[in-house]
Image: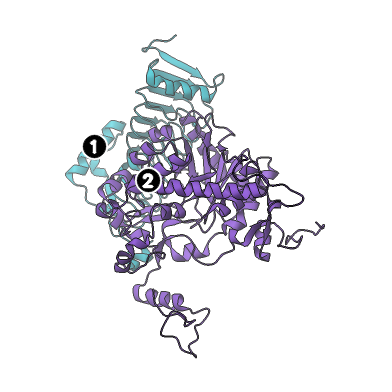
C-alpha cells in the first residue's frame, strides 16, 4: 500500500493498459498522487481521461492519444509521443521531452502542452483554448480551424499555418512556409508580449519575445460571402 | 406556392397549349433564376425531396396457408432491443426499436431538445445529442442519451462522455456523406457561442473530417481511447452516411463498433447545400441489405447492432427496415414533425417568410414559426416541451403499434423475427435494392432463379 507521498511505479511489461488507466481514474477518489509508468513501448491511449491533480511520468515513447482529455494532471512523457497527444486536453499540463506526431493537442480546451522537440502536421488543429508551446518546428496545416487559445512555435512553421483560423493567437519565431486562408501577420502588442512571455517562461523555453511574429485571423471569412469563394 | 396547376383542376391559369417541360419544370426554372440572382447555392434543411425508391416500394406478404399469424390484441409481439452487446459493460436496453437521431442544440432550440428527451424517455427509447455538445435540458430529460463525437468536437469533454449512456462517433450522415456543416451566424446566440468556443453571430463551420484520426485503422485506436476514458462501460456507435455500405460496415466492425448507424440519403439535415442533399449518397432502401450482408459475412449480424435511418415515417417503414435486417431505426425529420414542425396552424407565419406549412425547410435561418429549429427566444417559447414530448411519445407509440401489427400479421412473436422472406417488391429497382422478389414472381434481380 503506497502513501500519497510515494511514487507509484507501474510497469507496462506486466500491467495492462486497462488496469493502469482504471487505477489513474480511481485516483480521483484518493491514493497515490505521483506515478511513474515504465515500459510504455509505444502503447496507445496511455493515461487518458485522468481527472485528478496527479503527477504522472511516462518513461519512454507513447502511441496515439497519450494523456487524451486530461484534466488537472501534470503528465510528462520522457520520449516521443504519437498522434493526438493531449487531444481535447481540458486542464493541467502535458510535457513531451521528445517530438510529437500529428494533431498534437487537437481540439484542446484548456491547460498547457509543451513539446521540447518538433510537432508534426496539424499541431493544434481545431484548438479551443489550450496553450501549446513547441520548442522546435511544426508541420503543415497546424492550427487549422483553431478557435481559441495560443500556439507558440520557437522554430519554423509548415505550410498553410492557421488555415480558417478563428480567435487563436499564434506566435512563430522562425520562418512560416505559408499562411492558410484568412490567416495574416498581426502586430505584437503589449498584451501579446505579456502572453508570449508568460508562456515561454512556463514552458522553460530559451527564447526572446521580440524574436517572434504574431499571426491571427483576418476575420474576412467569418460570414460566408460568395465573393470570397476563391479564398477557400 | 402558386395556384397554377397544369392539370387545370385547381388553378385558373392553365389553358390548352401550355406544356411544362419535364426537365425544365417550374422548380428548375425558379432555381436557375434564384442562382442567377444570388450567385450562391441554395442551403436548406430537411432531407432529399426528390422521388427515390423507398420502403413504399415494398409490401409484406402476411400469413396465409403456410404460415399462421398471431392474434393482434392478445399474443405477444416483442419490441425490445439491446444495443452494445459486443464490448460495452453497460449495453443499452430500449423498449422499442425506434431511436431519436442526433440533432444539435443550435440547430434546434433548447425547448425542442428537451421535448425530444421527454418524448423518447416516455416511450422507453434513446435520444441523441448533436453538433453542439450536451445540454442540461436533454441530459436531464433523457433517460438514455447518446453523445455524439463529431469532427467539430464542439463542447466535447470527458465529463459528458462519462455521463452519456452511449457514444456515437459520427463519420458521416446520409444527407451529406463527405460533407461538413455550417451553422449560420443568425442562429449563434450567446449560449450557442459559449458552448462552441466561438464568437457570437459568426458562421460556425463543422469540419468534414475528424481532427485526430484518418481512416479505419486510426479510428480503431480512437475508439480504444474513448473506451479507456469511459472504462469500457459505454456502447460505441459509428454513424456512417450511406455511400459504400458494404465496405463501410465491414470497416466499422473492424474499427471496433458496438453499433453501426447507417443513414440513407433521405436523412435530414439542419443546413446543407441542396445540390448535396439531392445528389450524394444512396437511398436508405438500397443500403440495408449491403450492410446486413457485410455483418453476416463477418458473423456479426445481431452481435454488432445495425440502426437504419433516413426517411422513416411510419410503422411500415420501421417493420420493413427490420425485416431487411436492421436491429432498430432512428428518426429525425419525423420526430421534428411530431413535435410540431410544419404545423398548418402557423400558415400565416410561414407565408410571411416565403414558405408554407408542409414545405418549410429553411431550418438554418432560425425563423421557424413553430419554435423548433430556432434560437430566437420568442419563437422558441412557442414550443411547450411537455406537450411536445407527449406528441413525440404518441408518435413513437403509434409507430410501434403499427410495426407490431405488421409483424403479427406475418406470424412473428418479436419484431426482430421479421425477415426478407416476408417482403416483395413493387418495382424492379426496389427488388434489386432490397434483394426481395418482384411481387408475383420469384425474381430477385441479380440472383439466379431457382423457383419458389
Distance CA(mark 1)–CA(mark 2): 49 Å
B170 or A119: nearer the eye? B170
Residues at marks 1 and 2 touching, judged by CB atoms closer than 8 Å: no
Q: Is residue B355 above or below residue B308?
A: below
* Residue B200 place in picture, x, y as percent: 26, 51
B382 relative to B178 in the view: left or right? left
Q: Pointer 2: residues within 10 angstroms few (<14), some, or many (20+)?
A: many
The quadrant of the image that shows the N terminus of chain B is bottom left
- The chain assigned the colour purple in the figure is B
B306 relative to B171 in the view: left or right? right
The residue sitting at the right extreme is: B450
Disc assigned to residue B188: none
Q: Number of labelled discs?
A: 2
Instruction: Read off the residue under disc 1.
Output: A197
B213 or B174: nearer the eye? B174
* Residue B342 place in picture, x, y as percent: 39, 60
The residue sitting at the left extreme is: A190
Q: Secondary structure at mark 1?
A: helix
* Residue A87 place in picture, x, y as percent: 41, 37
Q: Quadrant of residue B439?
A: bottom right
The quadrant of the image that shows the C terminus of chain B is bottom right
Whether residue B105 is visible to the viewer of this picture, yes or no, is no
Q: Is residue B300 above or below residue B63?
A: above
Disc assigned to residue B115: 2
Q: Quadrant of residue B369?
A: bottom left
Q: Secondary structure at mark 2?
A: helix
B298 or B123: nearer the eye? B123
| Disc 2 chain ID | B
Q: Pointer 1: residues within 10 angstroms few (<14), some, or many (20+)?
A: some
- The chain assigned the colour cyan in the figure is A
| Disc 1 chain ID | A
Whether residue A203 is visible to the viewer of this picture, yes or no, is yes
Amino acid at each position: 500500500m503506497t502513501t500519497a507521498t510515494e511514487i507509484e511505479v507501474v510497469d507496462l511489461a506486466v500491467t495492462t493498459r486497462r488496469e493502469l488507466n482504471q487505477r489513474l481514474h480511481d485516483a480521483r477518489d484518493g491514493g497515490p498522487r505521483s506515478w511513474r509508468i515504465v515500459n510504455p513501448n509505444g502503447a496507445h491511449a496511455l493515461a487518458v481521461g485522468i481527472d485528478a491533480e496527479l503527477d504522472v511520468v511516462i518513461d519512454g515513447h507513447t502511441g496515439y492519444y497519450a494523456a487524451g482529455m486530461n484534466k488537472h494532471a501534470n503528465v510528462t512523457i520522457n520520449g516521443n509521443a504519437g498522434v493526438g497527444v493531449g487531444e481535447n486536453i481540458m486542464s493541467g499540463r502535458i510535457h513531451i521531452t521528445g517530438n510529437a506526431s500529428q494533431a498534437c493537442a487537437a481540439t484542446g480546451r484548456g491547460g498547457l502542452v509543451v513539446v521540447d522537440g518538433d510537432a508534426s502536421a496539424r499541431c493544434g488543429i481545431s484548438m479551443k483554448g489550450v496553450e501549446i508551446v513547441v520548442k522546435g518546428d511544426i508541420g503543415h496545416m497546424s492550427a487549422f480551424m483553431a478557435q481559441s487559445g495560443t500556439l507558440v512555435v520557437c522554430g519554423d512553421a509548415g505550410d498553410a499555418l492557421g488555415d480558417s483560423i478563428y480567435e487563436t493567437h499564434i506566435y512563430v519565431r522562425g520562418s512560416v512556409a505559408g499562411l492558410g486562408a484568412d490567416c495574416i501577420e498581426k502586430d505584437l502588442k503589449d498584451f501579446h508580449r505579456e502572453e508570449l512571455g508568460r508562456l515561454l517562461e512556463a514552458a522553460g523555453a530559451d527564447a526572446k519575445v521580440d524574436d517572434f511574429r504574431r499571426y491571427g485571423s483576418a476575420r474576412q471569412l467569418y460570414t460566408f460571402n460568395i465573393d470570397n469563394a476563391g479564398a477557400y | 406556392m402558386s395556384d397554377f396547376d397544369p392539370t387545370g383542376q385547381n388553378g385558373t391559369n392553365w389553358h390548352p397549349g401550355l406544356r411544362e417541360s419535364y426537365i425544365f419544370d417550374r422548380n428548375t426554372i425558379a432555381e436557375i433564376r434564384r442562382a442567377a440572382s444570388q450567385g450562391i447555392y441554395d442551403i436548406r434543411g430537411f432531407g432529399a425531396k426528390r422521388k427515390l425508391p423507398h420502403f413504399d416500394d415494398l409490401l409484406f406478404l402476411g400469413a396465409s396457408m403456410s404460415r399462421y399469424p398471431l392474434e393482434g390484441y392478445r399474443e405477444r409481439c416483442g419490441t425490445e432491443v439491446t444495443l452494445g452487446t459486443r464490448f460495452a459493460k453497460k449495453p443499452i436496453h430500449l423498449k422499442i426499436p425506434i431511436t431519436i437521431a442526433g440533432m444539435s442544440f443550435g440547430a434546434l432550440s433548447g425547448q425542442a431538445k428537451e421535448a425530444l428527451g421527454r418524448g423518447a424517455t416516455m416511450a422507453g427509447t434513446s435520444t441523441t445529442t448533436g453538433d453542439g455538445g450536451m445540454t442540461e435540458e436533454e441530459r436531464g430529460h433523457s433517460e438514455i442519451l447518446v453523445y455524439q463525437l463529431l469532427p467539430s468536437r464542439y463542447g466535447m469533454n470527458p465529463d459528458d462522455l462519462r455521463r452519456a449512456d452511449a457514444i456515437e462517433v459520427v463519420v458521416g450522415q446520409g444527407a451529406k456523406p463527405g460533407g461538413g456543416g455550417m451553422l449560420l451566424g443568425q442562429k449563434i446566440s450567446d449560449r450557442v457561442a459559449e458552448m462552441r468556443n466561438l464568437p457570437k453571430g459568426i458562421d460556425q463551420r463543422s469540419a468534414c473530417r475528424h481532427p485526430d484520426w484518418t481512416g479505419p485503422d486510426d479510428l480503431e485506436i480512437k475508439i480504444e481511447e474513448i473506451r479507456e476514458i469511459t472504462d469500457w462501460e459505454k456502447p460505441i456507435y459509428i454513424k456512417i452516411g450511406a455511400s459504400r455500405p458494404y465496405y463501410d460496415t465491414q470497416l466499422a466492425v473492424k474499427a471496433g463498433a458496438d453499433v453501426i448507424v447507417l443513414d440513407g440519403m433521405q436523412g435530414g439535415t439542419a443546413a446543407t447545400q441542396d445540390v448535396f442533399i439531392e445528389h450524394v449518397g444512396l437511398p436508405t432502401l438500397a443500403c440495408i441489405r449491403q450492410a446486413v450482408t457485410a455483418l453476416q459475412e463477418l458473423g456479426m449480424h445481431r452481435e454488432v447492432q445495425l440502426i437504419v435511418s433516413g426517411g422513416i415515417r411510419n410503422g411500415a417503414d420501421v417493420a420493413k427496415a427490420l425485416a431487411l435486417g436492421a436491429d432498430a431505426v432512428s428518426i429525425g425529420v419525423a420526430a421534428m414533425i411530431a413535435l410540431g414542425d410544419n404545423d398548418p396552424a402557423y400558415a400565416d407565419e410561414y407565408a410571411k417568410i416565403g414558405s408554407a406549412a408542409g414545405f418549410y425547410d429553411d431550418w438554418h435561418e432560425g425563423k421557424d414559426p413553430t419554435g423548433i429549429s430556432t434560437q430566437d427566444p420568442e419563437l422558441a417559447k412557442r414550443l411547450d416541451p411537455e406537450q411536445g414530448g407527449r406528441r413525440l411519445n404518441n408518435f413513437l407509440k403509434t409507430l410501434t403499434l403499427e410495426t407490431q401489427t405488421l409483424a403479427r400479421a406475418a406470424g412473428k412473436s418479436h419484431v426482430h423475427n421479421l425477415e426478407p422472406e416476408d417482403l416483395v417488391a413493387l418495382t424492379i429497382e426496389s427488388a434489386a435494392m432490397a434483394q426481395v422478389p418482384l411481387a408475383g414472381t420469384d425474381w430477385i434481380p441479380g440472383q439466379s432463379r431457382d423457383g419458389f
